Image (cartoon, rainbow, N blue to C red):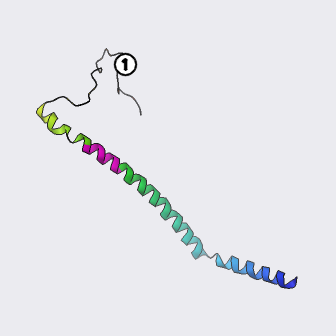
Amino acid sequence: MWKLTKQYWRDMWNYLWSKTSIDEKAIATLKEVQKRYKLTAKELTDVSNALKQVGNQIDDIPRALAGKKRKGRKTNMGENAQNPINMNSKK
């Protein structure tokens, strides 16, 4: 029984000393890196979506300079429209 108790306290002592401040700092740094990676990936996704929208709208510039109407413009946008579409709506 004494050997088991002695071994238990040795194991506890080694365990406590294995958790030094360097290990804790490394764990905290790893968590921070993972958090930043996720945020960066999300931001890159948002940027790629914005670039796709810009690419879709670039074709409108020459048409606007030529004086043509916008493609896909809703005709039901007058003041007396009963159901104005996309007017002051929040997404």
Span shown in magenta: 47-55
Answer with the quarter of the image where residue 83 lies: top left
- At x 83%, y 81%, the residue is 4
Residue where numbered disc 1 is placed: 83
Considering the numbered disc 1 on the image, is that residue within a helix, a strand or a loop? loop
In percent of width and height, residue 41 lies at: 42, 56
Say if the magenta span includes residue 49: yes
Locate residue 44, reporting x and y percent. 37, 54
10 Å crowding of disc 1: few (<14), some (14-19), many (20+): few
Q: Amino acid at mark 1?
A: Asn
Which corner quadrant of the image does residue 27 belong to? bottom right
Residue lying furthest bottom in this view?
Answer: 3
Q: Residue at x 41, y 57 (%)?
A: 40
For the point 37% across and 49% down, the residue is 46
Chief secondary structure of the magenta span?
Answer: helix
Name which quarter of the figure residue 39 lies in. Answer: bottom left
Estimate the x, y position of residue 24 in percent, counting from the top left. Answer: 59, 71
Query: In the picture provided, is 64 more to the left or to the right than 1?
Result: left
For residue 33, above or below residue 59 = below
17 lies above or below 34: below
- Name the residue: 53% across, 64% down: 31
Image quarter of the N terminus: bottom right
Magenta stretch containing residue 24, yes or no?
no
**Left or right side of 82 for 69:** left
Image check: 22 left or right of 79? right
Location of the C terminus by quadrant is: top left
Residue 64: x and y, percent? 16, 34
